[in-house]
Amino acid sequence: MILAQVAAAARSAAALPMTLAVAAVDVDADLDAEPVPGTGGEPAGGRGASCGTGHGRGSVGVDDTVVLPVASASKLLLLAEVARRLDAGELRADAVVPIEDEDVTGGTGLLRRLSRTGAGAAGGAGGNACGWTVEDLAWLTASVSDNTATNALLRTVGLPATERLARDLGLADLTLHDRVRDVRGPGVPPVFATGTARDLARLVALAVRGDLVSPGASARLLEWMRSNTDHGLVPALVQHDPYAECFPDPLPGGLLVANKTGTDTGVRADAGVLVGTRRVAYAVIAHWDVALGPSTERAAVHAIREVGRALAAGAQRGEPATCALVRQPGG
């Protein structure tokens, strides 16, 4: 994988009125790979790109340490904590979580629209005796970014637990600040979550390598990510099979994707892994001033998709990376 191509694709958006942060990790590269010839050990991609984005030499970053709103891409951290607890036996997959009135919110998701939710959860009288299992809520959060399911899971594990996990994993700048809300006003955090492309890519890379606390938790998180239905950003212009059952193993001659996206005012984010002949963990975040109008949003989406082309090209290359990361044992 020529990671310089990813950096170049990211930097092509430099003239646009936005921040485009990108981090990519070649999970299958060798730790002792040689520096790029002629760079004096400098990372591929030149100024503004880094080959040490916190996950090893098999990585590249452009503005990847800039802390930005990351919207629902941050739900990966919540799902990682749920996966950790399930694997450790601290939480049962079939444990029923009641949906409280405070959990119910608009935006993405299906839960509040289903008849099982009950009148109480929809804001009516009479309360709500209905609940969903932890596993149900995780699938809903991962597949359709269900905000009500997210809030129920957050209430179950607690924000402090996600903070501890982020710290334990070395994700210093990835933070869930609050539950999902329809309206943000005085007295509540201004955004749901903030983070960096570096931390999001690192979180995914740890799961791909089986090092997200445990192999079991890693596999569970990747399985949930695989169910995501939003492939409109990084994978949008890339031919891939969203249904192949061989994942996380590669599809011969094909490309597989597992990801989590995020959308908010002035924000588009996508973090995941592309599985081809190589496994490439990535995170791309675009942030812009909405006062610039809808054309900037269109430009942001286009820029993310162009980065996706470069990432996919890297995942489908067989030669060693220009920078490298530890190979997963037995991988």
Image (spheres, rainbow, N blue to C red):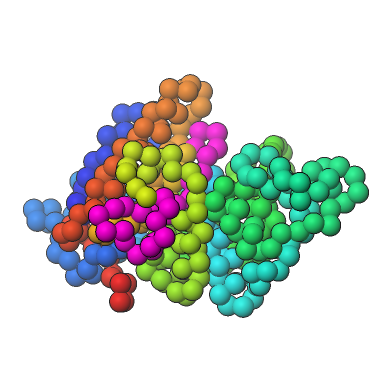
Quadrant of the frame with the N terminus: bottom left
Q: Position of residue 237 (x, y in %)?
A: 33, 38
Q: Magenta residues: mostly which secondary structure?
A: loop
Residue situated in front as seen by the camera: 107 or 277: 277
Stretch in magenta: 242-267
Residue beneath the point at 46% across and 68% down: 219
Determine the image quadrant of residue 246: bottom left
Q: Is residue 252 magenta?
A: yes
Q: Is residue 153 visible?
A: yes
Q: Position of residue 181 (x, y in %)?
A: 68, 43
Quadrant of the frame with the C terminus: bottom left
Q: Is residue 10 left or right of residue 161?
A: left
Residue situated in front as seen by the camera: 165 or 279: 279
Residue situated in front as seen by the camera: 260 or 227: 227
Q: Is residue 160 visible?
A: no
Q: Position of residue 211 (x, y in %)?
A: 42, 72
Q: Is residue 262 above or below residue 321?
A: above
